[in-house]
Structures are given as structure tokens and as C-alpha cells.
Image: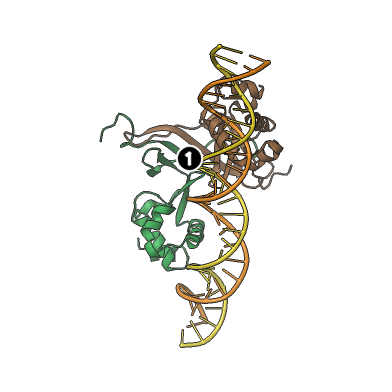
Chain colours: A green, B brown, C yellow, D orange
Amino acid sequence: MKASDILYQHDVKKTLSRLALIQALQSSNLPLSENEIRDRMHEQYDRITFYRNVQTLADSGIIHRIVIDNTLVKYALNCCGKEKEHQHSENHVHFYCKNCGQTICLDAIPAHSYPLPEGFSMTDCEVVIKGYCNLCTPGNHA
Amino acid sequence: MKASDILYQHDVKKTLSRLALIQALQSSNLPLSENEIRDRMHEQYDRITFYRNVQTLADSGIIHRIVIDNTLVKYALNCCGKEKEHQHSENHVHFYCKNCGQTICLDAIPAHSYPLPEGFSMTDCEVVIKGYCNLCTPGNHA
DNA sequence: TATTAAATGAAACAATGTTGCAAATATAGG
DNA sequence: CCTATATTTGCAACATTGTTTCATTTAATA
């Protein structure tokens, strides 16, 4: 889907930096870090605007934030760039390769539901699996 | 268990700042942030030493790190201060209250195992559930 | 096209995490 | 107990990440 249509459908103002940010994410089928997005945005990248826009786009449901650890955050378009019309499930599982850094949205795998203590309520469940991808798992030879 | 015994059993050198760090965590039955630990360490707290020691103690299996999000990390003793002798399970579930900030180790709940794509391998599974604790859930009146 | 509210980008700040290095300290051996 | 040695500590300086204020620019509406 066109970046401008995504913004329009989510009732978010169309600006050059937002279009460039969405297009950067669309140029990859994997979630990207700020640095990876910056490299794809070229001149359009401004750090302060970036922080504000990822907040705005996350709030409006266009993208989601994946916290790999306290020093690494990745961003991904909801619906992962596919043309699916149905709303992206917020609570799916993410995989991070500790060797190559590749991050994968396992959209097909919903986060398991865990029993909470009496009186507690849940709004989000974030699951990050760390390990090695098919290319980096010892013993696999690509 | 005494802090010095914990260090000895894990073959980590006994120093004042490590003892104070462990004792700070022992003084709470909930995981603590750096600031919460700092307040409990008083004069013994030094920021650089703190970062190095949490790394050392995590590597040796004495504590574990809970990344709530990119701007908030909590630390907890393995075995959660209880006198259990068995090794703490690395992959349990954590709960974070979005209202009061309280973080809870749900030690009894092992992280669910998720199917990975062919050729992938897992080393860690981090599950953070966010929501509201019993005191902060709307509708509950303490 | 003019109006208005929102978005941008610069500067300055705040918080978090890291590295190099000299001084201090913990353990092991005598 | 004392000395030797390797580790730990704490300072200074730096790097990265994220935020706030405010004047200017831009997008959407009438």
C-alpha cells in the first residue's frame, strides 16, 4: 500500500518525513533500527522528528516498536508490509539473532496467554526470543 | 543466604560494592531499577562500578536483568531471595504495572515455548507482560 | 488563497551506557 | 602475617539515546 494512503487511512497528517519513514520500512521486510532507517531516509532524516514520528505512528497503529534490549529498538510496519487488510495483532512473537542482528516478526505466532495473580490485568504481552537464525545456528551450513 | 556466600559460591570476588549491590536487592522482594538500588546503596554506589558489577553478576548467574523497555531496566536476584537451593529458571515471566511501576517475577510461570522457523535455535525467551497490578487495576478498590 | 492548527528542526538538555587509565583492593603463596 | 599479582575500583571523558522549548514552516480546511 502507498505510504500516503496508510497515513490517510489512519488519520495522520501526510508529511515528507513521515512518508520517508514509512517508505524506509517498506523497503525492508524485516524490522529496522533507527540507524537502519536513517540510512534509508538520507536527507529526510532528522533525529528529533524521527523520535516524534515513531511515537505518532505507533500511537496511531501504523507501526510497532520492538524492544530487543535497553540499547536496541527496532520498528516494523503493522501488517508487515503485506497487503492484508485485517488489523495486525499487537501481541505476536519476535525473534532476534544474536549473531547477525536480524529481527523477525513471527506474525503467525500469537503470544501465549499467561495466568496472572488475582486482581491483575494485562494490556500488552511482549515476547522476544533470542538465539540464532538459520544462517547463524552452529552446525547449519548455508 | 549471606551476600558473601553467594559471591563465594559463584566464584566471584567479594568486594564492598558487590556486597552492597546484592544486599540492596535482598532488601526488596521485587526487582529494582538502578535508581532504586542506588538509593539503597548510599555511599557505596558508583555508577560505573554499578554497570560493571551488574554485568559480572548477571554473567555469573547471581542476578538477572529485566528489560521493561528501552528506558527502564530492573535487576533481580536469581532465586528471588528465597532459600531455594535449585537453580533459578532463566526463562520465567515478568509483570510490569504501567501505573505504579511495580515489577514482579512470576517465577512459577515458565515462558511458553514457541515454534521457530526451520534451522533456527533459541537461547533465551524474554516475556514481559504489561498491565495493572491488583492495586492499580481500575475497578479494584484496595 | 487565506487561515489555523500541527509538524518541523535547531539548540540545549537529560539520562543511560562505555572506555582508558592510574590507584586501590582481594586473594593466593610463601 | 606479609608480599606478589591480577582484579576491581573510581575518575575523566566520551558516546548514544531520548526529551523539551520555541520560532519557523507546512498541511489541511474553509
Name the foreground residue: B100 vs D21.
D21
Q: Quadrant of the N terminus of chain B?
A: top right
**Element type at mark 1:** strand
The three-letter amino acid code for the residue at tag 1 is Val
Residue B7 place in picture, x, y as percent: 60, 23
Q: Can residue A121 be seen in this snapshot? A: no
Q: How many residues crowd mark 1 within 10 Å: few (<14), some (14–19), many (20+)?
A: many
Closer to the camera in the image, B142 or B97: B97
Task: Give the image location of residue A116, x and y in percent.
Answer: 59, 36
Q: Is residue B2 above or below residue D16?
A: above
Residue closer to the observer: D16 or A82: D16
Q: Quadrant of the C terminus of chain B?
A: top right
**Which one is in front, B84 or A120?**
B84
Corner quadrant of residue A118? top right
Subunit of label 1: A
Q: With respect to residue B125, does A86 lie above or below?
A: below
Report the number of discs. 1
Horizontal side of B1 relative to B86 (left or right) equals right
Which corner quadrant of the image does residue A44 belong to? bottom left
- Which residue is denoted by mark 1 in the rendering? A127
**Picture quarter containing residue C26?**
top right
Residue A123, image x and y in percent? 56, 46
For this orientation, the residue located farthest to the left is: A142
Q: Is residue B3 in view from this perspective?
A: yes
Residue at 40 percent of width and 59 percent of height: A22
Side of B10 where A106 appears, left or right? left
Instruction: Classify residue B84 as left or right of residue A63.
Output: right
